[in-house]
Image (cartoon, helix red, strand yellow):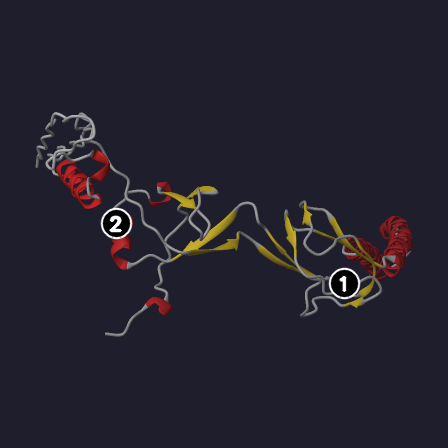
């Protein structure tokens, strides 16, 4: 809206005279000025609006390809040790040393406990002494058998006496063999005084301490060992996903990635070991 305003100039009269139609600028009413400014503002606001700027979205172009897309099956699983061994004492005796702490990582064959070996050392020494005695008796019996063999040929002794000597030789030999077996048993028992780790893993809670009396094949283990490298991850999958797994010719070739529950990047990768032949009853639903 446009507004036109015209201003006329009225000639002045003689000095000291004023025309009634003559209007001074200073005497214009304030209301007229305010109306004029309002009209100008309205005229300024009534202009044409600017057009909207078009927003352009970039478009990318790619070549279509045909390829295999991996199918992911997500499941919640639990980590299990590959091996768990409960360490027991195989002999009875007083525990003199505990060389491992709870939660330690130990190597296979590392010494864990020591049982007082003195009784078993004495038993080994006794078995060795018995062997030496019986071997001496066996040699004596063999020498007597040789003498009697010559005498029986000349009929100086009876055949019955010679047979007794031969039987004594065989008995002495059998006794020596038994003594050797007793020595082996004593050596094995002595070796059980040192209890070593059966696998490379991590120790659990210790059930005994130095000074305790341990018994052979007690129900309470000295410690429980878990193999933690490598480990198993056990998980259950729905029936429809199990069908997808069975379509693979080799189940052991299926890769498995393990991630924390929070969903961060995988921390380990492995292969499917086996599919159990039983259904977890906790996942069954009654119809």
Which quadrant of the figure has residue 51?
top left
Question: Tag 1's secondary structure?
Answer: loop
Which residue is label 1 attached to?
91
Give the mark count: 2
Q: Nearer the viewer, residue 238 or 186?
A: 238
Q: Position of residue 199 (x, y in %)?
A: 63, 49
Quadrant of the frame with the N terminus: top left
Dot 2 falls on a residue whose secondary structure is: helix
| Residue 179, visible in the rendered structure | yes
Label 2 CA crowd tier, 10 Å (few <14, some 14–19, many 20+): few
Q: Earlier in the sequence, mark 1 or mark 2?
A: 1
Check the image and report above or below for 204 versus 25.
below
Residue 142 in picture, x, y percent from top left: 86, 50
Q: Would you identify the image quadrant in which residue 20 lies?
A: top left
Q: How far from the left and from the top, in percent, is residue 146?
A: 87, 48
Residue placed at 21% from the left, 39% from the top? Answer: 27
Disc ID at residue 244: 2
For residue 217, above or below residue 4: below
């Amino acid at each position: 809206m446009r507004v036109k305003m015209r201003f006329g100039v009225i000639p002045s009269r003689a000095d000291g005279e004023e025309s009634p139609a003559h209007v001074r600028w200073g005497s214009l009413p304030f209301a007229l000025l305010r109306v004029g400014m309002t009209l100008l503002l309205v005229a300024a606001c009534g202009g044409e609006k600017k057009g909207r700027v078009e927003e352009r979205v970039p478009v990318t172009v790619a070549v279509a390809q045909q390829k295999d897309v991996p199918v992911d099956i997500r499941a919640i699983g639990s980590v299990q040790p590959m091996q768990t061994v409960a360490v027991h004492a195989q002999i009875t005796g007083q525990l003199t040393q505990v060389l491992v702490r709870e939660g330690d990582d130990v190597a296979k064959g590392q010494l864990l406990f020591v049982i007082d070996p003195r009784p078993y050392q004495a038993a080994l020494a006794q078995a060795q002494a018995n062997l030496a005695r019986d071997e001496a008796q066996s040699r004596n019996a063999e020498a007597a058998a040789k003498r009697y063999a010559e005498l029986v040929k000349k009929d100086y002794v009876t055949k019955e006496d010679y047979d007794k000597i031969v039987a004594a030789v065989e008995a002495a030999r059998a006794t020596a063999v038994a003594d050797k077996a007793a020595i082996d048993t004593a050596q094995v028992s002595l070796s059980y005084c040192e209890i070593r780790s059966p696998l490379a893993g991590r120790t659990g809670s210790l059930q005994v301490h130095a000074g305790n009396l341990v018994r052979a094949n007690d129900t309470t283990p000295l410690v429980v060992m878990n193999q933690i490298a490598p480990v198993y991850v056990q998980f259950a999958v729905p029936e429809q996903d199990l069908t997808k797994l069975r379509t693979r010719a080799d189940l052991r070739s299926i890769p498995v990635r393990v991630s924390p529950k929070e969903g961060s990047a995988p921390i380990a990768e492995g292969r499917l070991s086996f599919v159990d032949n039983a259904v977890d009853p906790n996942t069954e639903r009654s119809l």
